[in-house]
Amino acid sequence: MTISLPTDVANDRVRGGSFGSTMSGILAEMKPEAVYFTASPGGERSALAIIDMKDASEMVKYAEPWFLAFGSAVNFEPVMIPSDLEKAGPYFEAALKY
């Protein structure tokens, strides 16, 4: 999932001293497999978090803390590991009819 933090909101949290603790609290609850911090193409503070979501309903669990704490924009981008790609074989075969 990608998370973009609006600069004005994040700056207010930095100035108020709650940026780090809020970020740490959300990440502790998320338990991402990995998280990377960067700047988005628009220049906002951003993060790429690798999570293992078992059900689409978990989007609420992962996104809402970011929405509520920072007014963030959140995107989910499903990815596959090699074993997922192996399981996809029948779908490739079915697509050949097109």
Image: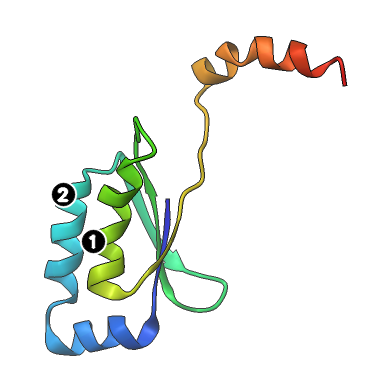
Task: Judge by depth and name the residue closer to the eye, 38 or 49.
Answer: 49
Task: Judge by depth and name the residue closer to the eye, 29 or 47.
Answer: 29
Task: Judge by depth and name the residue closer to the eye, 70 or 83.
Answer: 70
Kindly indicate whether the residue at mark 1 contacts the one at mark 2 (C-beta within 8 angstroms): yes
Q: In which quarter of the image is the C terminus?
A: top right
Which three-letter amino acid code belongs to the residue tagged 2?
Answer: Glu
Q: Which residue in the rendered view is the most extreme toward the front?
A: 57
Which three-letter amino acid code belongs to the residue tagged 1?
Answer: Pro
Task: Judge by depth and name the residue closer to the eye, 46 or 76.
Answer: 76
What percent of the width, then of the height, locates residue 65? 23, 61
* Residue that mark 2 sits on: 29
Q: In this view, does 35 lie to the left or right of 28?
A: right
The Cα atoms of the two marked residues, 2 and 1, are separated by 9 Å
Q: Which mark is residue 11?
A: none
Query: Label 2 neighbourhood size at 10 Å, few (<14), some (14-19), many (20+)?
Result: few
What percent of the width, then of the height, locates residue 26? 19, 58
Asked which quadrant contains residue 36, the reply is bottom left
Where disc 1 sits, the SS reads helix
Q: Residue at x 34, y 34 (%)?
A: 52
Q: Which residue is drawn at 21% across and 43% down?
A: 31
What percent of the width, then of the height, locates residue 93? 76, 11
The image's colour scheme reads: rainbow
Mark sitting earlier along the chain (2/1): 2
Q: Nearer the viewer, mark 2 or mark 1?
A: 1
Where disc 2 sits, the SS reads helix
* Residue that mark 1 sits on: 65
Q: Which residue in the rendered view is the most extreme toward the right?
A: 98
Q: Is residue 6 above or below residue 72?
A: below
